[in-house]
Image (spheres, rainbow, N blue to C red):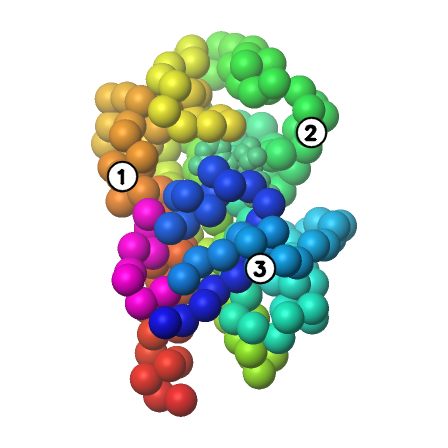
Amino acid sequence: MKRIIVATGNMGKIREIKSIMNDDDIEILSMKEAGLETDVEENGTTFEENALLKARAIHEKCKELVLADDSGLEVDALNKEPGIYSARYLGEDTPYSIKNAAIIERLDGVPKEERTGRFVCAVAAVLPDGKEIVVRETMEGYIGYEERGTNGFGYDPIFRPEGYEVSSGELPMEEKNQISHRGKAFRKMWEILSKEENNG
Ligand code: IMP
């Protein structure tokens, strides 16, 4: 059984990652479950840098296989805001109903074809020997006109994945995982890690 420590304190994220990397042969642990703690400042300028900062900080403490992700929403008409500041947009503790309403308000009068955007997810791995791997995936779509759905979190209620008539907040978790930035990035990382193991 392979142990993977995910550098997050967010149990919702852990649940989602467990459901994405659904494999009897791996044990996925949060930092807390692994008895580790860190408070990394996410001061990178890209999703990749921030994911690596988090993974390195935990790897430093345990020297095991560590994964970390960094994700966010890019809105093209807003110069790709909130981007890497998605969690901090309008304040970390501000409810998403307010953050989502603010984005819709800022897009007032912007036609559908210019409301494009994407969720981005970078996943970084630091292997026990210190080797680093980073991947990035996106879920393309556009910003809707109102909040819809209660299945997801964050900006899901205002995001309409390309080719869907519903928001990502209206999709069941399994269906969102099939097409989501995080789903694609963690699956890609798992593919790479499996090959590493076979070659090593
Ligand atoms: P992170 O935890 O530093 O990766 O911050 C990610 C932030 O981006 C979250 O707090 C959300 O605001 C936003 N975000 C990332 N992925 C999603 C998603 O799948 N749905 C909705 N919001 C997301």
Q: Amino acid at mark 3?
A: Ala
Q: Check disc 1 and report its element: helix, strand or loop.
A: helix
Task: Report which quarter residue 64 is drawn in.
Answer: bottom right
Magenta span of residues:
19-26
x, y percent for residue 26: 36, 65
State the CA–CA distance, disc 3 to disc 2: 26 Å
What's the residue at 38%, 51% (across, down)? 18
Q: Which residue is mark 1?
A: 174
Query: Label 2: how many residues lie within 10 Å, few (<14), some (14-19) or many (20+)?
Result: few
Look at label 2 and name its amino acid.
Glu
In terms of depth relative to the viewer, which is nearer, 136 or 91?
A: 91
In the displayed structure, would residue 200 be above or below residue 155? Answer: below
**Residue 113 appears in view:** no
Residue occupying image coordinates x 61% and y 18%: 95
**Which residue is the site of mark 2?**
92
> Contact (CB < 8 A) between labels 2 and 1?
no
- x and y percent of residue 46 in the render? 63, 52
Q: Quadrant of residue 175?
A: top left
Percent of width and height locating residue 38:
72, 54
Q: Quadrant of the C terminus?
A: bottom left
* Magenta stretch: includes residue 24: yes
* Crowd around label 3: few <14 · some 14–19 · many ≥20 (10 Å): some
Which residue is denoted by mark 3 in the rendering?
Answer: 34
Q: Nearer the viewer, mark 3 or mark 1?
A: 3
